């Protein structure tokens, strides 16, 4: 029984009133935003080959250094998966919201589904699956990439045309610094928030820092923080409102009420 099959989620009037009354809306999205597009969240059990691995062990520079083809194969599979799915109604609702309010999106997601739904994304806090670069000289890699139709255990990563180094995905691995432009864009958007503005925290477990610290920073600016997530999370207690439902069901209802 997937979440979406259950009784439709009601969106409290307090939430639609808050969004209607806001001038600015800051969106902080996580993997749950893309769940209804068919992209597994970080906490979903990894599929097949990577089932027995914890993503936070695979998503490290160390794992890549120890076995580049194994880690590269995981990312090649994820690139293939994202490329073959579509943005969901939640992504599309946020793109529409930007026609009605000043919307800024800071996402932890490394997929491009917000953009493919028509949103502009101010910050990819954890980088992007499709921004490849050399792991040695950091030269961006724009060459061909073989994406497997099925999960494959090992695929040799492409090599850098400049230094023969192994190409890596442009994501932020655990223990790596977040891109400064993404941090700056997010902090600028938070500083611009005024009382009455709204932060939509969508589909994130609120576990990974420093991204998980942004809702508290927004709260300190006097914004109204609304969590959209079927489940309780590490940041639920600090949110003013909670809509316990799936993003692709809830967001269209929120935007409908603002239109
Ligand atoms: C840093 C890219 C310092 C890769 C990701 C000990 C050792 C080392 C580091 C640390 C440590 N302790 C703490 C740290 C810091 C660490 C951290 O926070 N660790 C956690 C585990 C405690 N952070 C870091 O390492 C960061 N860097 O600290 O650097 C530094 C400083 C200076 C100089 C050098 C270094 C880097 C963190 C970034 C890691 N990269 N992704 C890749 O994708 O492969 S993180 C990855 O997991 C995601 O990007 C995401 O951010 C994160 C968590 O996933 P979520 O998005 O929250 O998704 P999740 O699956 O967890 O939850 C899904 C949610 O959706 C659930 O709540 C679910 O209920 C909900 N949901 C499900 N369906 C729906 C839904 N919601 C709505 N609708 C639905 N339909
Ligand atoms: Zn190189």
Image (cartoon, grey):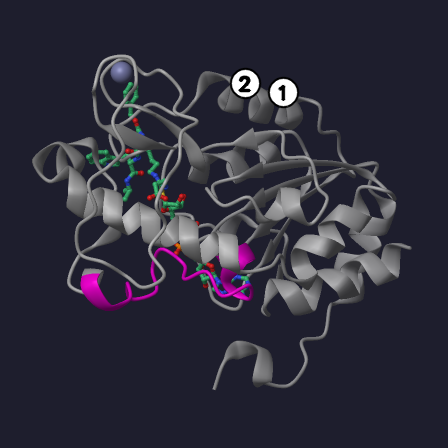
Specify the principal SS of the magenta part.
loop
- Tell me, yes or no, if residue 24 can be seen here: yes
Indicate whether 174 appears above or below 133: below
Q: Secondary structure at mark 2?
A: helix
Q: CA distance from mark 1 to mark 2?
A: 6 Å
Q: Secondary structure at mark 1?
A: helix
Residue underneath mark 1: 188
Residue 20 vs residue 128: left or right? Answer: right
Q: Name the residue located 62 percent from the left edge and 46 percent from the top edge.
A: 114
Residues in magenta?
32-49
Q: Name the residue located 63 percent from the left edge and 27 percent from the top edge.
A: 190
Indicate whether 254 appears above or below 119: below
Indicate whether 5 appears above or below 96: below
Q: How many marks?
A: 2
Q: Residues within 10 Å of mark 2 (few under 14, many from 20)?
A: few
Pinpoint residue 49: horizontal percent, then vertical percent: 19, 63
Q: Are marks 1 and 2 in contact (CB under 8 Å)?
A: yes
Residue underneath mark 2: 184
């Amino acid at each position: 029984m997937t979440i979406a099959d259950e009784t439709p989620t009601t969106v409290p009037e307090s939430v639609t009133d808050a969004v209607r009354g806001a001038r600015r809306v800051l969106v902080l999205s996580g993997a749950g935003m893309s769940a209804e597009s068919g992209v597994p969240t970080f906490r979903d059990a990894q599929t097949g080959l990577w089932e027995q691995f914890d993503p936070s062990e695979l998503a490290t520079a160390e794992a890549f250094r120890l076995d580049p083809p194994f880690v590269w194969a995981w990312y090649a599979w994820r690139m293939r998966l994202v490329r073959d799915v579509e943005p969901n109604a939640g992504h599309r609702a946020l793109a529409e919201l930007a026609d009605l309010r000043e919307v800024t999106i800071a996402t932890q997601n490394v997929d491009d589904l917000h953009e493919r739904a028509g949103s502009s994304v101010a910050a990819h806090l954890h980088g992007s699956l499709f921004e490849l670069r050399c792991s040695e000289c950091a030269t961006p890699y724009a060459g061909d990439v073989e994406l497997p139709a099925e999960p494959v255990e090992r695929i040799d990563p492409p090599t850098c045309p400049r230094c023969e180094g192994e190409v890596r995905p442009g994501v932020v691995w655990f223990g790596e610094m977040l891109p400064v432009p993404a941090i700056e864009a997010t902090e600028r958007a938070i500083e611009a928030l005024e009382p009455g503005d709204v932060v939509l925290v969508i589909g994130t477990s609120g576990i990974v820092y420093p991204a998980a610290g942004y809702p508290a920073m927004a709260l300190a600016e006097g914004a109204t923080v609304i969590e959209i997530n079927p489940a309780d999370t590490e940041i639920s207690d600090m949110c003013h409102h909670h809509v316990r439902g799936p993003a692709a069901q809830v967001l269209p209802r929120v935007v409908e009420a603002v239109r």
